[in-house]
Image: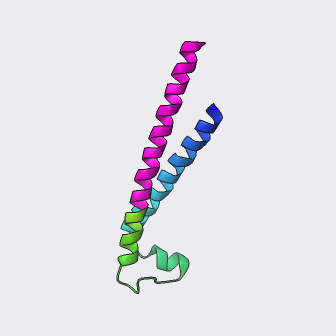
Amino acid sequence: MKAKFDVRLRLEAALALVTLSVAVITLAWPSWIEIVFGVDPDHGSGSFERLLVGGAAALCLVSLLLARGQWKRSRSEMAANSTSA
């Protein structure tokens, strides 16, 4: 059971890190989308970049909250197992 907790915690933390990175990169260098993918989805208005930063920040926050909850459950399960042993 501990392995399942560890995998989930690591996935949620990794997702938070990736989405935070996307948000920071987009804030620092908004034109990366056009350069990397060769498309301009908002035709230069910057609205797509703002939407991407907002979505990435929201997903980062959700991932962090899920990872925190998973970490707390894992810690409480480990404490319960150590007292019962």
> Residue at 43% of width from left, 51% of height from top?
62
Span colored in magenta: 56-85
Q: Position of residue 23 (x, y in %)?
A: 41, 62
Q: Is residue 40 above or below residue 79?
A: below
Image quarter in which the N terminus is found: top right
Q: Position of residue 5 (x, y in %)?
A: 59, 37
Give the percent coordinates (x, y) of residue 32: 46, 74
Quadrant in which the C terminus appears: top right
Q: Residue at x 50, y 38 (%)?
A: 70
On screen, residue 62 above or below 35? above
Q: Nearer the viewer, residue 48 or 83?
A: 83
> Does the stretch in magenta take in 81?
yes
Identity of the residue drawn at 39% across and 58% down: 58
The residue furthest bottom is 43
Left or right: where 48 falls relative to 9: left
Q: Relative to residue 30, is residue 36 drawn left or right?
A: right
User: Which one is nearer the viewer's eye here, 58 or 20?
Assistant: 58
How many badges with numbers are in the image? 0
Viewed as shown, does residue 18 lie left or right of 54? right
Q: Residue at x 54, y 41 (%)?
A: 9
82 drawn magenta? yes
Location of residue 49 with respect to 57 vertically, above or below: below
